[in-house]
Amino acid sequence: MSDRNELNGARGMKDKVPRDNLSRKDFMGTVGVCACLGGLSLAVTGALRSAVPGVLPDPSARFKIGTAGDFVPGQIKNFKEENVVLIRDDEGLYAISTLCTHLGCVVNRNEDGFQCPCHGSRYDHDGNVIRGPAPKSLPWFQIERLPGGQLSVDRNSEIPIGTKLKLDTEEEV
Amino acid sequence: MKTPSMEKAASRKDIHDLPPNTSSSSASSSGLGQLARNLRDLPGNLRQAVLRHGFPDSPRTRSQAVFSSLFLHIHSVRTHRWTLKQTFTLGLGVATLALFAILIVTGIMLMVYYKPTEAEAYQSIKDIHYVVPGGRLLRNTHRWAANLMIVGVLLHMARVFFTHSYQKPREFNWIVGIVLLILTFALSFTGYCLPWDQLAYWAVVIGSNIAGSPRELFEALGWTQLAGIGDLQREILLGSHFVGNEAILRFYWLHCVALPFLMTAFIGVHFWRIRKDGGMSRPEDILPDELDGLPSDKVARTSFQDPGKTYTLVCAVSDGSPQVDKDEENTVQSWPHAFRAELSVAMIILALVLLLGIFLDAPLKVPADPMVPDNPAKAPWYFLGLQEVVSYSAFAGGIALPFFFMASLALIPFLDREKFPTGRWPRQKEAGIIGFSSLLAFLSVVAILAFRVKFGWLRDWNPGINQLWIILVNPGTMLVMFFGLYTLWVTWRTGSTRLGTTAFFCCFLVFFVVMTYFGTVHRGPNWGFYWWPSQWPG
Ligand code: HEM
Ligand code: FES
């Protein structure tokens, strides 16, 4: 053992350098190594920041759906590109997201409600989860009235399930 | 017959032979004569300049062939005969390497025609398939080699595990191996996303949302301020909030630049470590008849047994390499024996991949449609086990479980430090544990799958249940818990950590295989259960 240490010679090759007799050279070495590591990690962090997109040119969360007159009770309109389905019943108009809250597949509407093809989540007519891995219900989005009778859906603002927009008959004309 | 001394003389001449007539001032004709002679000698001299040794037909030139070549010198000059036993390695590591090499070559060629944009990706793959001369074979070969590489790397891992080859001093190389396993899966995933067909698009949607699934956990816990971590991961992967051009570019970059680079680097470390760990594992008590039929080296048998000779190349290697310098008389020259074996494996693999490529076309679905996923939207077969556990909970199945399995596999060499006969396949008691554990794991996986299909799970019984319950208690986590307890029980009953880890490893393999099979065969539209795909509605 001892002759191997001699063979290796340099202090650095020994298994342990006793702390108490750190020479000036060792100290400067340690400082140097720390400086290198610090500098490198700063550089790497700086470079990695570029992985996070700075400006996200997202399409607008709002989209127009037409006027109140376009929706008669019992009507269901699927806005496929926006992944929102608009439903008009006797109580009013409401917008439900068709993106599964599990991992984002597009759900299909059927007679029982909504069904996801990817991992079998199921929702009732109002979008409440009833089966499968989905952790949340399908969100309902706010419908806004624009000047001139136009309606638009804002996918950034969720409203409680069951909040329907009342459309009075006057408006429908 | 050339004697060694003649060879020595010949080589001395090579070195000291100055070009004749350099100093003499004879007639101009002799200058031309010189030129003519040089031209005549050109092939030989060129060969000498490149290779620096004669044809590898003597022990010395065969050694030189190994250590004077950048590409071959990763091998030692001599190889232990046990390493050449076909029933030991089964050639699986080399097969995996050959597949990787095929993937690199075909991949680089595919890059010429592939266009990583939303608008052009699909069409460019179609062009490769139908227009580019030889493009179809290129694409098929790339695809089937990728599939086989998954199989190869898993089987190789099983070989290393069952022959006890991860044990000291090979712990680190086992970890490097786990990194290679993860990289192989990552390369496959990023690769099948590139054609931008229905499979690709929805795989990216699902994959990126799995990256975002820590949100599920943090929201269930009520720590909403942390939920953004998942979103950040997702954003980094996609370069956007949506799956589009940025996502294709990032997947392309990962698949063609970052991951192959990492893979190459880690394969380099893997091979370097095999050398530094003293070559491949082998038992200490090899009986002569176990090596019957393998190439042998009579000269080595006598000369290495002669105590007057020492094999000093390895004296610089200090502790940690117990096998260097042992059992030298049972080694043979790597050239030609090891190289011949490796080349054979590589050629068989190449032939297999080419045959598959000629007769089977790589799938390409209809172009990506962000409005309607396929039903069922299935991943490639090797991810269908994952898809099954993800269908219990995105976070538990997509992040927690894979992390748990990879971490526990990586720790195996540190949890089991028993001295078992390395380099040998299991015998007696161990084989019994393997059989029993596999059967038990099989039955438990099948039982829980059948239970869930028949009776549903928490959400079906109580739709309002807190998601935290589902993350914690689902078929995947229950099985993991069961495997863990069973492993502890085996360790306690047998008093052996090796038998304990064997039990765990079998559980993992069976879990992977059964889940994959189940997702492939028995899942249909809306991820419902069907006995056979032929029973799928419409
Ligand atoms: C890209 C993937 C991989 C490649 C190309 C590769 C290649 C190789 C090769 C060529 C060998 C020589 C022995 C043989 O042919 O079996 C080897 C040995 C070894 N591999 Fe891998 N391997 C890969 C992945 C893995 C994985 C996933 C593990 C385990 C987690 C692993 C652990 C080991 C260990 C511990 C050895 C030494 C075995 C011994 O000494 O008997 N490797 N590998
Ligand atoms: S994405 Fe809908 S169930 Fe998984």
Image (spheres, rainbow, N blue to C red):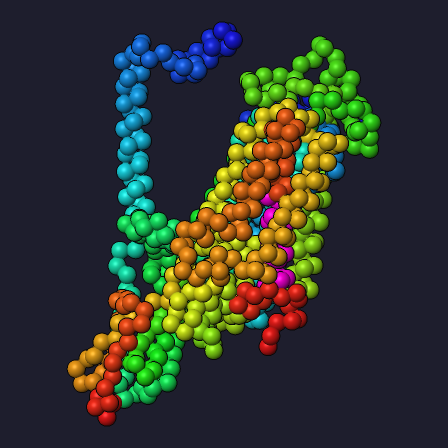
Estimate the x, y position of residue B31 in percent, counting from the top left: 58, 36
Residue B12 placement: quadrant: top right
Between B55 and B284, the one lying in front of the other is: B284
- Count of numbered circles in the view: 0
Estimate the x, y position of residue A114 in percent, counting from the top left: 44, 72
Name the residue rendered at 81%, 24% in the picture: B288
Does residue B471 appear left or right of residue B415 in this picture?
left
Estimate the x, y position of residue B289 in percent, counting from the top left: 82, 27
Can residue A81 be spotted in the picture?
A: no
Does residue B106 appear left or right of residue A94 in this picture?
right
Name the residue rendered at 54%, 51% in the picture: B475
Q: Is residue B22 above or below residue A141?
A: above
* Secondary structure mostly seen in the magenta stretch: helix
Q: Is residue A19 above or below residue B266?
A: above
The residue stretch that appears in magenta: B508-523
Name the residue rendered at 66%, 28% in the picture: B494
Can residue B131 be spotted in the picture?
A: yes
Q: Is residue B80 above or below residue B443?
A: above
